[in-house]
Image (spheres, grey):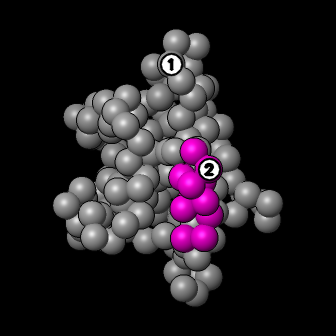
Amino acid sequence: MNAIKDSYEKQEETIKVVVPLVNYLKGKKWKVKKAHGSQYSRGWPDLYAMHRDYAPKWIECKVNRNGSIHFTDHQIQEFPEWIKHGNNFWIIAEVDLRNNPSGLDRVYRTLFGPPNAHLLLNPLTRGSYL
């Protein structure tokens, strides 16, 4: 994957999914931290969310483009290791959460179900989930 395309996709992901989700979670009293951005955290999920009353959540945000999502090379290497070592997380794959209260409500409910990363990482189960 070339760096320019990866950069564009990350910007689109931030605008359409990350920012609306972070704002929504903060409105529900979650503390949300961006979890990547250095050479030491490549391949990590985008967000770490904490709440006084709920278990913390690692969250990876993706833009769903016509039923397809893209993982970076680092994510393809790291994510299976996270799962193998018992550190499950949620992948939020949405077209656009801006001005989409029902989409944000649905995503929020997803975070209280079982982690879904293993389903979206597997190309055989990904299609039925998206």
| In the image, farthest residue toward the bottom | 2
Instruction: Give the amino acid at mark 1.
Output: Tyr
Q: Quick check: marks 1 and 2 in contact, CB under 8 Å?
A: no
Q: Quadrant of residue 21?
A: top left
Which of 81/104 is in front?
Answer: 81
Residue 84: image x %, image y %? 56, 55
Q: Residues within 10 Å of mark 1 (few under 14, many from 20)?
A: few
Which of 87/90 is in front?
Answer: 87
Which of 116/46 is in front?
Answer: 116
Between marks 1 and 2 in the image, the one whose residue lies nearer the viewer: 2
**Residue at 67% in and 47% down:** 35
Note whether 96 is above or below 66 in the view shown: above
Query: Left of 56 or right of it: where is 65?
Result: left
**Residue at 54% in and 62% down:** 80
Q: Which residue is mark 2?
A: 85
Q: Is residue 82 magenta?
A: yes
Q: Is residue 55 magenta?
A: no
Query: Left of 37 or right of it: where is 13?
Result: left
- Determine the secondary structure under disc 2: loop
Residues drawn in magenta: 76-86
Mark found first going from the N terminus, 1 or 2: 1
Q: Residues within 10 Å of mark 2 (few under 14, many from 20)?
A: few
**Residue at 69% in and 53% down:** 36
- Determine the secondary structure under disc 1: strand
Instruction: Give the amino acid at mark 2.
Output: His
Q: Quadrant of the N terminus?
A: bottom right
For the stretch drawn in magenta, the main secondary structure is helix
**Res 93 visible:** yes
Q: Which residue is mark 1?
A: 54
